[in-house]
Amino acid sequence: MTNVQTTQADELQIKGQKAKQAAAMMGVLPTSAKDGALKAISAGLLHNTPYLLDANRADLDAGRAAGLSESLLDRLMLDEARIRAIADALIDLTRLADPVGQVLEEWERPNGLKLSTVRVPLGVVGIIYEARPNVTVDAAALCLKTGNAVILRGSSSAIRSNMALVSVIREAVATAGLPEDAVQLVEDTSRETASRLFKMNDVLDVLIPRGSANLIRTVVDNATVPVIETGAGNCHVYIDESADKEMAIRIAVNAKTQRPSVCNAAEKILIHQNWPHTAELVAALQWEGVVVHGDEAVIDLADGVLVASEEDWAMEYLDLEAAIRIVSSTEEAITHINTYGTRHSEAIVTSSLQEAKKFQMGVDAAAVYHNASTRFTDGFEFGFGAELGISTQKLHARGPMGLPALTSVKTLISGNGQCK
Amino acid sequence: MTNVQTTQADELQIKGQKAKQAAAMMGVLPTSAKDGALKAISAGLLHNTPYLLDANRADLDAGRAAGLSESLLDRLMLDEARIRAIADALIDLTRLADPVGQVLEEWERPNGLKLSTVRVPLGVVGIIYEARPNVTVDAAALCLKTGNAVILRGSSSAIRSNMALVSVIREAVATAGLPEDAVQLVEDTSRETASRLFKMNDVLDVLIPRGSANLIRTVVDNATVPVIETGAGNCHVYIDESADKEMAIRIAVNAKTQRPSVCNAAEKILIHQNWPHTAELVAALQWEGVVVHGDEAVIDLADGVLVASEEDWAMEYLDLEAAIRIVSSTEEAITHINTYGTRHSEAIVTSSLQEAKKFQMGVDAAAVYHNASTRFTDGFEFGFGAELGISTQKLHARGPMGLPALTSVKTLISGNGQCK
């Protein structure tokens, strides 16, 4: 199915065709060849650090002139330490197992057909992202390791940095004997080109947005190619009546305050009506600077609590702000979470294994914790050694995505002349 | 994310909310409860056969009056034998293993966190399909077995049959003690309602189109919810130079002619230039009534061969028609297939294990055969015991989809107070 609307050769079409050709070559490469390319990229980045910093400085200057905020400029910024960290991460990636070629199942049918399912690359992966230039290298490296070709589309504010990074990557890939077109950057950062990328069904096997909720929504609403949605986390900590006081307060405070701006930070705390330490929990949160909203029961129990509105329960604050609700049972907590949650990370603190099991079964989320902070939902903490993002959809991959999320399967069937 | 555009309560919104509530209940049911519902549906269909046939007769009468073709009327038609077959299939389904609750992986982290990945239902599944009323029961049953709620949207030509079937199903589901809203039919068969279904991201975890290429394209092009694409099969049989004459002809003829209208039927035959039996293969195909197109080399070698145009190589004939091309190597066959194929089912006939391996590695398709007919690509032939369709995409599920394709995963994490 061809959704590309122009017949005239243009950047996307040309790069799309090159990506398909590169993907065909990448898919059959041995692990050692792919790891060789990752090492070459790592060395290339270190060797070309001054060139990369020059390009990045031009982006930063343009960004300052355009009035970008300090936090955006910080995301955009590269320095020697950051480039070294990126280069080191590439070496770490060479140490991970290659999922491609892994035999997942083998079986035989009564008619003598022998079947096996093996992991194969997805093919051509599209990544659309915002200002962070480290994503350029990270996404390219994960795709190379898994034998995919990648088409990168970063933001206009990082275009000089991205062009410099991709030219270093492509040169290293070619030096390592791999097809350089396995990594390509869309240099036209217009919205029109992005919209066409969303519909390149003849080229892209998947499109993965990495960035703000707005970016992700735009991709989900407009893409006709398969998308992996990574997104919001309105995460809850539920404190059951039997929860240990010290553990519950520690987990709730950690989940809320350790890094409030990230998707696996807790936004809401639900407390069983018989747990007697609500006032102390509120005080502990306030001590850490958290603005606490609550329902009437919480307001009765603790000081300085603002009224939580209906909107609060669905909101992702991403800040030192939380809403607390008193519930009468684990079932009520589950219903609240399944109504307002975003299916990301949810936690129960309880001494009862039965309540823990009920919660873990009943809550619909990628990661459901018992007696631990929601902050552990990420590919490194899960032990995957790499992370492509945290999927909040249920199809293909759910939760932190490691290398296997960038693969598909193929069934190989061997016979001796079987016909139907 | 809410894409439903009206705030007024209407059929889709109401059914969507009911489906979500039902899904929450379905997800935690034991296998025995779900199998009990399947048995109750089976009995209900048999018991209500006269009622179902009456409703179907009204659809058939309306279809005849509207000038539907005989083949469409045949697809629409129910009779006692077909209802019995549908009822029997439900009993077969109770014998299959329930994927929900299956522990896929268990591991522990250095910080003491214990993780496990378990299969869970997808949640709410949308199925959009055409005239066959058997899909109504089949899709509902597969979703029930896997603990999902389903929203069915069939065609207007089968609406009376579908309403009757769904009322029988819902009654049986309720009798078995399950939430009847786990199975709902969209009774408004307008295009506008279908278009809204495509964008019900707040309700549907996946939308699966089952039917014609047109239907599938419409869904893929318009849906913002995750879609599993099931689709076209421009399948090839490649006959390598070392292929056994009798086996190659038998496989090619079987793959082409055993049931030419289905997606796993072969459409193209590629022949190595050194294989000396092209004329006999062409004659065997023609003997079976196949109209044979070919490139110049084939026209030189065999009688009665039409010129194959560039369009032929990409076309899915779905009929007694084939195109044949002579190639100089397995590599050329792979390149041809990866250029023109639809990534469905591809076969090599060869005595060389090396060429077979090269072909199976290099061809990008859901199922790649060595010395067997492409016609085996289906869930029953693969031994899955059930089939929801054959996915031609690479995300989530590829090839024949059995029960696990209707599930997602959830990671359960247990700790003793770990914080980050």
Image (spheres, coloured by chain):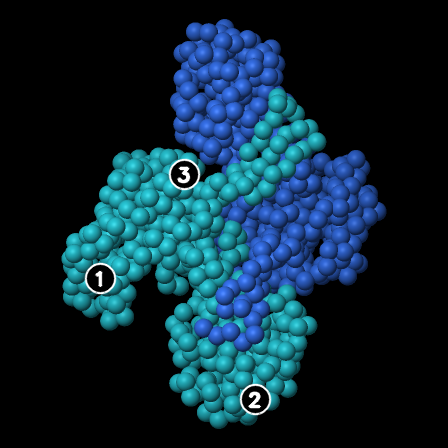
Chain colours: A blue, B cyan
Q: Are marks 1 and 2 on the same chain?
A: yes
Which image quadrant for residue B364?
bottom right
Mark 3 and mark 2 in contact? Answer it, CB < 8 Å: no
**What chain is tagged by disc 3?**
B
> Which one is in front in this view, the residue at disc 1 or the one at disc 2?
1
Residue A169 in picture, x, y percent from top left: 74, 52
Q: Chain of mark 1?
A: B
Tell me how far mark 3 sits from mark 2, CA to CA. Answer: 58 Å
Judged by depth in the image, the label closer to the viewer, 3 or 2, is 3
Name the residue tied to disc 2: B277
Check the residue under mark 2 and report the chain it is in. B
Residue A261: x %, y % from top left: 59, 27
State the count of labels.
Answer: 3
Q: Nearer the viewer, residue B352 or B3?
A: B352
> What amino acid does circle 1 point to?
Glu
Categorize mark 3 by other alpha carbons within 10 Å: few (<14), some (14-19), many (20+).
few
Q: What residue sits right under mark 3 in the picture? A: B30
The CA span between labels 1 and 2 is: 48 Å
Task: Identify the residue position indicated by label 1 in the image.
Answer: B80
Q: Is residue A356 left or right of residue A405?
A: left
Dot 1: few (<14), some (14–19), or many (≥20) neighbours within 10 Å? Answer: few
Q: Residues within 10 Å of mark 2 (few under 14, many from 20)?
A: some
**Identity of the residue drawn at 68% across and 62% down:** A28
Q: Earlier in the sequence, mark 1 or mark 2?
A: 1
Q: Amino acid at mark 2?
A: His
x then y, percent, for residue B377: 48, 65
Whole-number angstrom distance, CA of label 3 to CA of label 1: 32 Å
Judged from the image, the secondary structure of the residue bearing numbered disc 3 is: loop
